[in-house]
């Protein structure tokens, strides 16, 4: 194991920029196939809006550390009655949880355990969401500005996207008549 040293890392709370960063990726709408319920609205938005950016993840990982952290910055937007959201995942290592700290914007963190128990945690500036081990988690930007949050996780956690990608999550976050609602995903009715 390499030797580890204390470090200061600067995070811009409105853009999610991380300095220094060790990795990053972006997800554009065309890469989120099967995530949104309304696939016609999804295809139309890719065409009409020229495949917009949905979210970007920037990480800072010290080689040899058991923990790493980073930011996720989610653009505002909607597909049909659903807001822009992340893919959602369980961790590969079922013993590893995670912490999300919201820096700007507003949204919801949707969680679900293996038995189908569902929960939401509000995401707003200064709020910290605790994600217990073996709960799937997906973040949703319900507001008009970018939703920026810092996450802190075990390096060993890994991502398991399979189940959420195949079946979706049991709850959907939708906007109906100007109200944000948590509704049952018809696939689970
Ligand atoms: C890491 C984690 C976040 C998400 C990121 C993108 O365990 O929860 O860094 O990976 O917010 O979400 P996904 O990975 O679901 O597309
Ligand atoms: Zn995670």
Image (tube, rainbow, N blue to C red):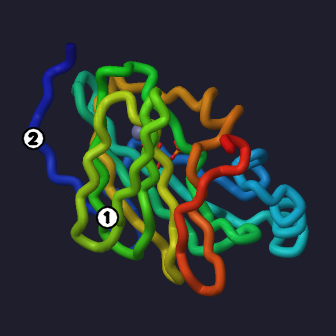
Left or right: 1 as drawn, with respect to 170: left
Determine whether label 2 and label 1 are within 8 Å by CB.
Answer: no
Residue drawn at (28%, 54%) of the image: 129
Splitting the image into 4 quarters, where does residue 95 fall?
top left
Q: Which residue is mark 2?
A: 6
Q: For marks 2 and 1, give the one nearer the viewer.
A: 1
Residue at horizontal 22%, vertical 69%? Answer: 126
Left or right: residue 133 versus residue 126 is right
**Tag 1: Cα neighbours inside 10 Å, few (<14), some, or many (≥20)?**
many
48 or 138, nearer to the observer: 138
Asked which secondary structure carries label 2, the reply is: loop
Tell which circle, 2 or 1, labels the residue nearer the N-terminal end: 2
Drawn side of residue 25 relative to residue 49, left or right: left
Residue most extreme to the front: 189
Q: How many discs appear?
A: 2
Find ligand 2 in the image and state its quadrant: top left
Q: Is mark 2 within 8 Å of ligand 1?
A: no
Read off the residue under disc 1: 102
Where residue 141 appears, as percent x and y from the top left, is 51, 68
Q: Position of residue 63 (x, y in %)?
A: 29, 27
């Amino acid at each position: 194991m390499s030797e580890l040293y204390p470090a200061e890392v600067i995070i811009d709370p409105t853009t999610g920029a991380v300095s220094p960063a060790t990795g990053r990726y972006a997800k554009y709408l065309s890469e989120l196939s099967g995530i949104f319920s309304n696939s016609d609205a999804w295809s139309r938005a890719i065409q009409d809006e020229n495949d917009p950016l949905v979210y970007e993840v920037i990480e800072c990982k010290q080689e040899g550390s058991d923990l790493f952290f980073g930011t996720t910055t989610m653009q505002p937007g909607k597909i049909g009655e659903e807001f822009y959201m992340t893919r959602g995942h369980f961790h590969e290592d079922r013993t590893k949880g995670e912490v999300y700290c919201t820096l700007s914007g507003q949204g919801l963190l949707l969680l679900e355990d293996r038995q189908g128990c569902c929960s939401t945690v509000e995401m707003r500036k200064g709020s910290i969401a605790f994600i217990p081990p073996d709960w799937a988690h997906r973040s949703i930007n319900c507001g008009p500005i970018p939703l920026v949050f810092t996450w802190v996780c075990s390096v060993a956690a890994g991502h398991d996207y399979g189940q959420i990608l195949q079946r979706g999550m049991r709850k959907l976050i939708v906007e109906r008549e100007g109200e944000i609602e948590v509704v049952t995903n018809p696939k689970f009715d």
